[in-house]
Image (cartoon, rainbow, N blue to C red):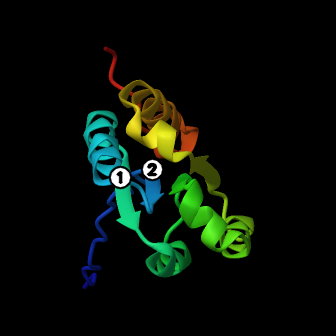
């Protein structure tokens, strides 16, 4: 008599969702990042320098957006974090973060680039 072997389900793996980390940025900047990210299928995580180290150890973000002031607080730490990961580091001047037009251009450029990353499997929505 033939024994029945259990079947294995084949579940295709979903492509990873691109992650952009925002560190030390004003609330309005973070909110605008999240709005754009929702439109483009990108995940945005907000953190400080301490939680950034933990986040970098557990994920592979596409980019890190950091306020210039926070970067200057510990540039060696940021440079070391970026050397150990494939993430790009984007330092934002306070004037850019608070100017609506500059802010929109920066956010759109980073998040659209993350959404277009070939490994993400995500395509940006047309406007």
User: Quick check: 8 above or below 31?
Assistant: below
Residue 43, numbered label: 1
Give the quadrant of residue 40.
top left
- Label 2 environment density (alpha carbons within 10 Å; few <14, some 14–19, many ≥20): many
Sequence-first disc among 1 and 2:
2
The residue positioned 72% from the left and 67% from the top of the image is 79
Q: Report whether residue 12 is seen.
A: no
Q: CA distance from mark 1 to mark 2?
A: 6 Å
Q: Nearer the viewer, residue 121 or 115?
A: 115
**Front residue of 88 and 92:** 92
Residue 33, horizontal then vertical, whole percent? 34, 43
Q: Estimate the x, y position of residue 26 in percent, counting from the top left.
A: 35, 53
The residue indicated by pointer 2 is 18
Quadrant into which the N terminus falls: bottom left
Identify the element where label 2 is drawn.
loop
Residue 126 relative to residue 106: left or right: left
Q: In the image, is residue 95 above or below residue 22? A: above
Q: Residue at x 75, y 67 (%)?
A: 83
Q: Is residue 78 above or below residue 62?
A: below
**For the residue carrying disc 1, how many other residues have a C-alpha within 10 Å: few (<14), some (14-19), or many (20+)?**
many
Taking depth in this image into account, of 93 and 116 the one nearest to the observer is: 93
Q: Are marks 1 and 2 in contact (CB under 8 Å)?
A: yes
């Amino acid at each position: 008599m033939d024994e029945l072997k259990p079947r294995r389900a084949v579940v295709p793996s979903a492509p990873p969702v691109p992650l952009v980390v925002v560190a030390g940025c004003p609330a309005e900047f973070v909110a605008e990042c999240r709005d754009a990210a929702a439109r483009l299928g990108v995940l945005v995580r907000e953190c400080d320098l301490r939680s950034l180290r933990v986040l970098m150890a557990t994920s592979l973000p596409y980019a890190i957006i950091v306020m210039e002031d926070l970067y200057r607080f510990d540039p060696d730490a940021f440079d070391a974090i970026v050397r150990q990961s494939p993430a790009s580091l984007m330092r934002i001047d306070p004037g850019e973060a608070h100017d609506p037009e500059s802010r929109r251009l920066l956010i759109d450029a980073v998040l659209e680039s993350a959404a277009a990353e070939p490994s993400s499997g995500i395509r940006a929505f047309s406007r």
